[in-house]
Amino acid sequence: SSGINAEYGAKKGNEYMGDVFVIFKVVTNVQDFDNALRYGLRTSGVWHRYSEFDLLYQYLLHTYPSHIIPPLPEKKLSTSLWTKMTVDKFDGEYLEHRKIGLEKFLHRIASHPTLHDDNIFKAFLMKGEDWKEVADSTEFRAKNEGFLKGVAASYQLKHCDPRFSELRTYADELESRINAVLKVTQNVAAKQRLAYNSYKDLAKTFSDWSAIEKSLCIPLQKIGHHLDNLEGAGNVLLLEEDVKFCENMREFANYAYSLKDFIRKYELLQYKIEVLESTIEAKKAGLFLLGKPEAGEDVVTVEGGKNNLSKMFKPTPQQKEARRSKLHQELSEAEEALGPAQSDLEQFVTEADLEIKRWKKDKFASLKDTLRMYAKLQLQHSQQGAQCWEAVRAAVAVKPSTI
């Protein structure tokens, strides 16, 4: 997977019934012979809509329940580093953010020890128009669909592995803390941009001043030139900061949603066991009560005249036997389903524990590199400012010309 690189382009296309949409070009270059044999190509270029990236995410989510699936970039961006984003989905700045996020998504999958070798993922890199049909043919949505239909939108587990409850708390905190960092860095960058734009205005004032000064004409022009350069170089650094720092931070804020999807799969497995255990307990209690002499009495209300007359009828032996047989059958089915459900949970927890450790290791390395990059960019801001003012000092240190 390390031999695969993805590049993106975006263009407008006309869909059926005249709908206008954006599609992204994924160019895959396999850089070594072994990977070329594995993927069956050296270079490929295919077009995909955002919805197909989302379909790939959903496929991986259902197919690899014990893995943390890399997050997609959010469907809508509200702000960039220092400007309000347009709502136009064809805006160049918006598309650039989207392309960077999608590239990170594919690179994360390509570097994952398990996901990178998935056939549907490899087909995504090689197939264009018919890829959706290839993914749908796996019927991945049908997995656990029957059970999920019976699960309420919100439910409370009786027992939860502390590793997963702690991870859920961490996911909530991670999203909150990173968004707080992004908000403040956006404010800092906005002030830096304002300062750089002010330097451009300052450069003009020095250039205008030079027109009336014979002895300081050249030094003043040089000061204006250096301040112009500082404004341009500073804004380049701010754009680089948006790509190398803010986009990486946004990715990890989005990982909160991937972690919650991952935790929900554990919760559903645990919930299934608890439902089966409750069912077994209820059926056993029903059989116990059915064995009592007074068990199973039904109340039939007969309306007549002004009074309601109630009579107690005991079930016949045949009715009691039919009910007992049904309870035994339901108890047997629940007990039979409990074993595999417990095995599924044990396997999930074992695999998930390794996946959590892998993710934490990768996260530590990625965040460390990102923070190091942010520190480097801030140093470059300072260095460019220092170089500019050193040049200004050198410009005014020259011997003045004759007035």
Image (cartoon, helix red, strand yellow):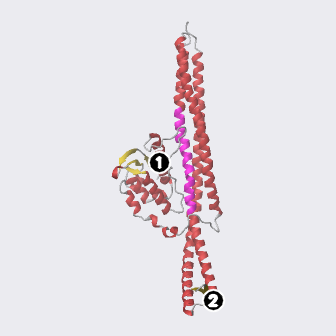
Q: Report the residue at 57% width, 10% height from top.
A: 400
Total marks in image: 2
Q: Amino acid at mark 2?
A: Gly
| Residue 388 to residue 172: above or below | above
- Point out the residue furthest to the front here: 306
Q: Secondary structure at mark 1?
A: helix
Q: Amino acid at mark 1?
A: Glu
Residue under label 2: 291
- Would you call the spot at circle 2 few (<14 residues within 10 Å), some (14-19), or many (20 or more)? few
Judge depth for marks 1 and 2 and give the one in front.
2
| Residue 7 appears left or right of 80 | left
Residue 257 painted magenta: yes
| Residue 352 appears left or right of 59 | right
Residue 239 painted magenta: yes
Q: CA distance from mark 1 to mark 2?
A: 65 Å
Quarter of the view holding residue 271? bottom right
| Secondary structure mainly formed by the magenta segment | helix
Residue under label 1: 103
Q: Report the residue at 39% width, 58% height from top.
A: 132
Going from the N terminus, do you reach mark 1 or mark 2 first?
1
Cβ atoms at labels 1 and 2 below 8 Å apart = no
- Point out the residue furthest to the bottom here: 317
**Can you give x and y, in whole percent of width and height, for residue 368 in the image?**
60, 46
Q: Report the residue at 45% width, 57% height from top.
A: 56
Quarter of the view holding residue 320? bottom right
Residue 106 or 334: which is nearer the viewer? 334
Residue 85 or 119: which is nearer the viewer? 85
* First to last magenta residue range: 235-264
Q: Is residue 297 visible?
A: no
**Can you give x and y, in whole percent of width and height, for residue 268 in the image?**
56, 66
Q: Secondary structure at mark 2?
A: loop
